[in-house]
Image: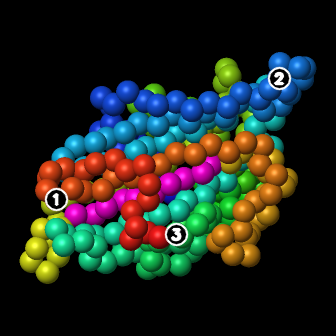
């Protein structure tokens, strides 16, 4: 979900002692000759304690040349939900900002676009892209992406669509820290928890092929170069008094 990078970094710091899981796609065209996109990588870190659970993600796009980075962006979909439960079962569905509207049910049945503050399907999209007359350059739709790795422990630096900002390897990054599962709450005087049961699919696209707005949340952008799946799915076991990772979405989300 589109969140402030500082929130992502805070979550990653909590997961510092969890060995990361890495998912990598390498473009087979590069082995057969010239290619623009070289790879897409997901670095996933997990926090799982008795009282707190979730997974954070950093995605890395690598191209052959820095100038090619402005041509590519990521589109992320999600399905699942965030809900409060007590020892007797689900109590209520959570809410979120979704496609510019506040207070929407935090429930996505089937794959839907993952976006909060705008209707551009690009993940971490720029709110006001286009030609900047004052500064004299094009602000790309992926200008919010970072040219430094959020996993390095420093504040990520926004590349702003300027090739001159790319130093060294031709890579851009985005990060996500979905709403986590947490215990310690009360509902109607009873102990309660927040359960986050979410699945994600993140797809690499040519920006020129991504519409600037989608007609419906469930519209899938055509012609992805590649898609990779990940999840943050942790449900509280009241008998065991701890969170457990699930492989399937909670029935309350379906």
Please tell me which of labels 2 and 3 falls first in the chain: 2
Marks 1 and 2, how far apart in space? Answer: 50 Å
Residue 10 located left or right of residue 39: left
Residue 173: quadrant of the picture: top right
Magenta-highlighted residues = 193-202
Marks 2 and 3, how far apart in space? Answer: 37 Å
Q: Secondary structure at mark 1?
A: loop
Foreground: 108 or 74?
108
Whether residue 201 is situated above or below residue 103 in the rendered picture:
above
Q: Which residue is mark 2?
A: 30
Q: Secondary structure at mark 3?
A: strand
Residue 177 lies, in percent from the top left, at 43, 49
Foreground: 47 or 4?
47
Foreground: 41 or 86?
86
Which residue is at 54% across, 70% downward?
A: 109
Q: Is 243 included in the stretch rendered in magenta? A: no
Please tell me which of labels 1 and 2 falls first in the chain: 2
**Residue 238 tag number:** 1
Image depth: mark 3 or mark 1 in front: 1
Residue 198: quadrant of the picture: bottom left
Please tell me which of labels 3 and 1 falls first in the chain: 3
Q: Which residue is mark 3?
A: 108
Q: Secondary structure at mark 2?
A: helix
Image depth: mark 2 or mark 3 in front: 3
Residue 166: quadrant of the picture: top right
Which residue is at 21% across, 56% downward?
A: 237
Residue 238 located left or right of residue 32: left
Marks 3 and 1, how far apart in space? Answer: 25 Å
Residue 179 located left or right of residue 139: left
Which residue is at 19% across, 72% downward?
A: 88
Residue 58 lies, in percent from the top left, at 52, 39
Residue 253 lies, in percent from the top left, at 43, 69
């Amino acid at each position: 979900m589109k969140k402030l990078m500082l929130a992502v970094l805070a979550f990653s710091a909590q997961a510092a002692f969890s060995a990361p899981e890495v998912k990598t796609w390498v473009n087979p065209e590069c082995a057969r000759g010239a290619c623009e996109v070289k790879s897409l990588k997901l670095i996933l870190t997990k926090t799982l304690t008795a009282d707190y659970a979730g997974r954070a993600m950093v995605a890395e796009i690598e191209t052959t040349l820095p100038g090619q980075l402005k041509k590519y962006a990521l589109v992320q979909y999600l399905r699942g939900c965030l809900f409060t439960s007590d020892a007797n079962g689900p109590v209520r569905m959570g809410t979120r900002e979704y496609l510019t509207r506040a207070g929407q049910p935090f429930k996505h049945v089937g794959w839907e676009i993952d976006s909060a503050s705008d209707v551009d399907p690009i993940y971490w999209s720029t709110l006001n892209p286009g030609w900047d007359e004052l500064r004299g350059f094009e602000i790309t739709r992926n200008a919010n992406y970072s040219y430094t790795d959020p996993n390095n422990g420093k504040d990520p630096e926004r590349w702003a669509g300027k090739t001159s900002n790319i130093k060294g390897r031709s890579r851009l990054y985005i990060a996500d820290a979905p709403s986590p599962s947490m215990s310690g709450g009360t509902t109607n005087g009873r102990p309660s928890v927040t359960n986050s049961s979410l699945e994600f699919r993140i797809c690499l696209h040519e920006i020129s092929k991504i519409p600037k707005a989608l007609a419906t949340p469930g519209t899938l952008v055509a012609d992805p170069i590649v898609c990779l799946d990940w999840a943050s799915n942790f449900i509280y076991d009241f008998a065991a008094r701890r969170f457990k990772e699930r492989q399937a979405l909670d029935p309350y989300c379906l």
